[in-house]
Amino acid sequence: MQIDVLIDLKTTLGEGPLWDVEQQRLYFIDSFDGRIFRCTVDGGEVRSWDLPAKIGSMALCKDGLGAICALENGFHLLDFASGDCNLIIDPEPDKPLNRLNDGKVDRRGRFFCGSMDTSEEGPNGALYRLDPDFSLHKIDDGIIVSNGPCWSPDDRIFYFADSWSGEIRAYDYDIKTGSVSNRRRFTTLDADIGAPDGSTVDAEGFLWNAQCFDGCIKRYAPDGSLDRVIEMPVRKVTSVNFGGPNMDILFVTSMAKPPLPRFPGDGQLRGSVFAISGLEILGVPEPRFGG
């Protein structure tokens, strides 16, 4: 195994690595500064887009010409060519202290994304499903910080984390309808050590989670047992995604500055995107939004 710095842009809050198999490009975001970046597998040909607000996550549209963006004030559609970013729907106009956060697309093209309390204290957030026809559906609520949505390779299990409860949850998933049921605890982190952030699932059905403030990536078996720990060179890792030509590189984002004053920085903090190779494990391609 080898950990390399892929690209070092000192993102304030780097998040959401997304490998697109069609373009063979890596997308990632600076959540706090409201920017989307794209680069090649070796960190070259960097392109960026400025957004009108903070961004929690993004998903490519099926034509590859634009993206669904979960901005702090609602779901938006970004046109890559013009840079125009237009509102689709704001799910929480009555909650000005909330913003949208992490999101991913299921294999039927639905975008799942949760909201969060910007003070990261109260259970004021919810989990939403944006369908390809732009209809919006609430899936769950009572969430402090939404993070880590992803699915098992057979589409039967949906995983989701509430970072400041320390809990990664598992739900039974109906791929035909996009509905969840039977919510249960998958694993729980000690809040004094770290918080579960972004996740992905590999081809073997194991869940990988970036554990922010603990400085490690953990791999969990489908039964929730801990399988592997990778110690990272920075503490504030934020999310993970497999990619590369063979889907065998684990990309890891990190933050350069904590967005809240109660989380001081440290000398190791870099805000880089890392590439971990030599894992001998394959990932699963991320779907595109169906709209």
Image (cartoon, rainbow, N blue to C red):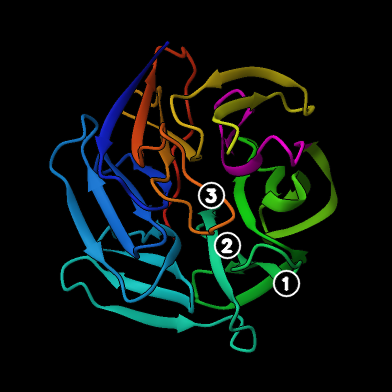
Give the answer, above or below, for where 92 lies relative to 45. below
Tell me the quarter of the picture where residue 31 sits.
Answer: bottom left
Residue at 32% across, 76% down: 52
Q: Which residue is mark 2?
A: 113
Q: Residue at x 56, y 50 (%)?
A: 263
Q: Is label 1 in contact with label 3 (beta carbons under 8 Å)?
A: no
| Residue type, label 3 | Arg
Distance between mark 2 and mark 1 Cα atoms:
14 Å
Residue situated in front as seen by the camera: 1 or 200? 1
Mark 3–mark 2 distance (CA, rounded to whole Å)? 15 Å
Residue 258 counted in the magenta span: no
* Dot 2: element: strand
Quadrant placement of the N terminus: top left
Q: Which mark is residue 124?
A: 1
106 vs 125, nearest the viewer: 125
Question: Which residue type carries mark 2?
Answer: Cys
Of the residues under marks 1 and 3, which one precedes in the sequence?
3
Disc 1, SS: loop
Residue 230, image quadrant: top right
Q: Quadrant of the C terminus?
A: bottom left
Q: Write down the region rendered in magenta.
A: 188-212
Label 1 amino acid? Asn
Q: Disc number at residue 107?
A: 3
Q: From the image, state whether disc 2 or disc 1 is nearer to you.
A: 1
Look at discs 1 and 3 and give the one toward the viewer: 1
